[in-house]
Amino acid sequence: MKYEFSEEDLKEIDAIKAKYPEVMPATLPVLWLAQNKFGHVNPEVQRLVASTLGLPEAHVHGVVTFYTQYYEEEKGTYVLDVCTCLTCQLCGGYEMLEYFEEKLGIKQGETTPDGRFTLKEVECLGACGYAPMMQVSNETYVNNLTKEKVDKLLDDLRQDKKPEHEKVGMPQRKNI
Amino acid sequence: MPEIFIDGQRYEFEGEHRVLQFIQDLGKEVPFFCYHPAMSAPANCRQCFVKAGQYVKDRETGEYELDEEGNRTIRWFPKLQTSCNLQMVDGMVIHTQETDEQVARAQKDTLEFLLINHPLDCPICDQAGECPLQIQTYKYGPEGSRFEVKKVHRPKRVRLGPRVILDAERCINCTRCVRFTDEISKSHQLTIVQRGDNNFPITAPGREFDDPYSLNTVDICPVGALTAADFRFKARVWEMNQTPSIDMTNGKGTNIDLWTRDNIVLRITPRYNKEVNDHWMPDEARTAYTLFNENRISRPLQKLDGEQVLSSWNNAYATLMEQLEEVKPAEVLLVGSPHASVEENYALAKFANLNGYRKPVFLRNEEKGKADGFLLTDDLAPNTNGCILLGFDELTPAEFSAEAEKAGLIILVHDDFISREVLTAGQLDGKYTVIFASNHTKTTKAADLVIPVTTAAEHAASYVNVEGRIQRTFRAKETKYNKRRLDMEMSEGRLDRYGTNFDNWVNEDNKIDCLPLWTFISNLTGYMGTEITLEDGRLIMSEIASTIDAFNGVSYAKMDENSGIQLDTEKVSKKVES
Ligand code: SF4
Ligand code: FES
Ligand code: FES
């Protein structure tokens, strides 16, 4: 497959570039644009981004590998990022990850043969208060994971029903 | 004048300075890894911590505020500072690890962190012995590690490019290699990938680290993470001798060090000279180490019945004398060489003069388009300007070819004219051809008499670079005729000092049976009865300096003191574009 930006994309990229005094900071948003378009930023897409922005390929590659949110290869339709960083780890993050592995029959980092799910182990997503937690395809968080919640999530996603944003209240002081 | 107080000592300074460099320039030390004087200072290794503050002055009176004991009060910056990127300001107070417990402790703890995932494989690591991480851990580091869990593993033996190999586990992510490709060679080929304890430098996927200056990253890597593909595991640093020299593969005159063990040159590294090459050298100049070891001519060769055979020195002198007598002086064509030193060319000129031969001529050896605006020039020879300053006539290949046809006896030095297609072997048929050379080439194969001469690794001699800077080499390798232990100018390593000729790591064959060109000429004139004395490079240079204007005031002592001398550029050809 040949990866190319359309006229429209290029216009959008110019608009992104115009926001910054230099080109380098445009790397992140343009990578997003590319990932939204192609579904991933594999080495070929990285090269496309580099040549479009006139930046070194090595630099773009470094940025891509720094963030787990950029996909370095083609992923499943849904990417399940399960947090196993300290707080989630202590609250059962590994059990959740292992439950996913068992249910999907794949290991973390792998994609199901039908191309529907990719399972990933990620570092802290900044939602330690709702540990153990996960994120679906760089979008919605699913908090306070339990096996039941995982079962439901997978069933829903099989029918392309994406999880809703879940409001988790925090205990507040009453007597002020 | 602005002042700064370092460990209780007052120093004055002018202009902009960073604390770390200033401390180093004073000859003192603060440990560091990521800082490099030629590149930006991102302050990411955190090893160069110092405590910094400012004496408090009363704004109105301008007097220093004193504490109860009468000492000036210091307002410390809230945290320890990285000295590499700390700009000096008037009245700054710095405490280093020498006087401050907290600083010493911080440096020790930083080292403990740096070593957490480090494999500690110094016994098999090429960098051991010249490794800042090893040295600084020894001096400032912790006794042991408190880290008891499994180390993080990273890729090993990664071929970054044709010449550089990465061991990511040893890397401390100082980013020197990345900054080198960004700021110095500008190939932008490297980046740091991944994050946290997984990160390491690499190229973009599917790309090679084939930067023509890639091996400089091996030199500046403060650990053993980057190694040179063709030097890995060849020698321990402490077994080798390090001898200053000059690059022979380009007219730039890059300053280098030759690293030898048992008279084999094992590697070449750049030597700092801010006038010529700063800290750097091109990769291709490093591969030249093989020229000193391989394919060498040892003992004179003589053509008998169309076949070259080993001869003796006596035979060589006698034969050359006979042959010279057979031709008229006007038929002798002496060809000097930009590949030979000033001293060698001078010896040739003196010999010509003495016998009434025509002054030597010479040809440039250039490759158009080679120049890269950095350390490579079009000139492939180290001493083109030396020949010009000695007043040699420069010939074009066509002119030379015509002259060669007319000559009865030709004396060449080094130049491989046949491979360069300046001459054909056929053109040399029927005339007696003598060549002074160090390596076998197509041209030496065609010659009637081959006199093996020393290379830049075996003699001390001078070369004038494209900018007209005269610089010299030192003897790094012994020949059959000199002894390291008796030669006060040769460096001596442990193996030389404690070994004997009967040790199994000493190989006599590594010493080449060759002479400096000037020694051969001296001996020859002795036999011819017109004795001239050309003893060694140093004396020849003082003779040159007193007889040839362009070299006025040049001496080895002066060259050594100033890392070379810039000659009067008026007299130097500007034809060679750098
Ligand atoms: S490979 Fe060496 S120079 Fe490069 S970042 Fe690692 S330690 Fe620094
Ligand atoms: S540790 Fe999982 S969100 Fe912070
Ligand atoms: S040398 Fe200052 S932080 Fe590395």
Image: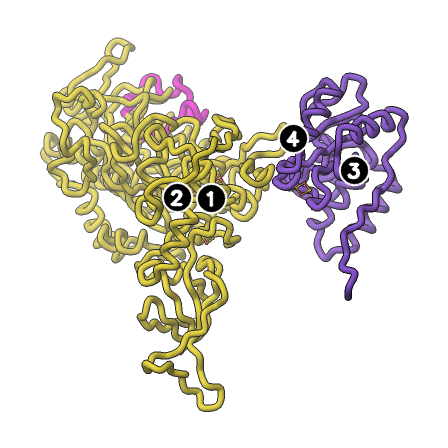
Disc 4 marks a residue whose amino acid type is Tyr
At which x and y percent is residue B351?
A: 21, 38
Q: Chain of mark 2?
A: B
Residue marked by disc 1:
B375
Disc 1 marks a residue whose amino acid type is Leu
How far apart are the two marked residues, 3 and 1, measured between alpha carbons? Answer: 58 Å
Q: Chain of mark 4?
A: A
Q: Which mark is residue A103?
A: none
Q: Colour of chain A?
A: purple
Considering the whole magenta stretch, tell me its main secondary structure. Answer: loop
Asked whether, in this view, residue B61 is left or right of residue B535, the answer is right
Residue under disc 2 on the same chain as residue under disc 1: yes
Please identify the quarter of the rendering in which residue B112 is found: top left
Q: Colour of chain B?
A: yellow
Q: Is residue B116 magenta?
A: no
Q: Which mark is residue A142?
A: 3
Q: Nearer the viewer, mark 1 or mark 4?
A: 4
Residue marked by disc 2:
B254
Which segment did they paint magenta?
A: B414-434
* Residue B281 at least partly seen: no
How far apart are the two marked residues, 1 and 4, measured between alpha carbons? Answer: 55 Å
Q: Chain of mark 1?
A: B
Residue marked by disc 4:
A94
Q: Secondary structure at mark 1?
A: loop
> In the displayed image of the protein, which residue is found farthest to the top?
B305
In the rendered picture of this protein, how many numbered marks are placed on residues? 4
Which residue is painted at 80% across and 21% down in the image? A115
Nearest the camera: B239 or B140?
B140
How far apart are the two marked residues, 2 and 3, measured between alpha carbons? Answer: 62 Å
Of label 3 and label 4, which has the lower sequence position? Answer: 4
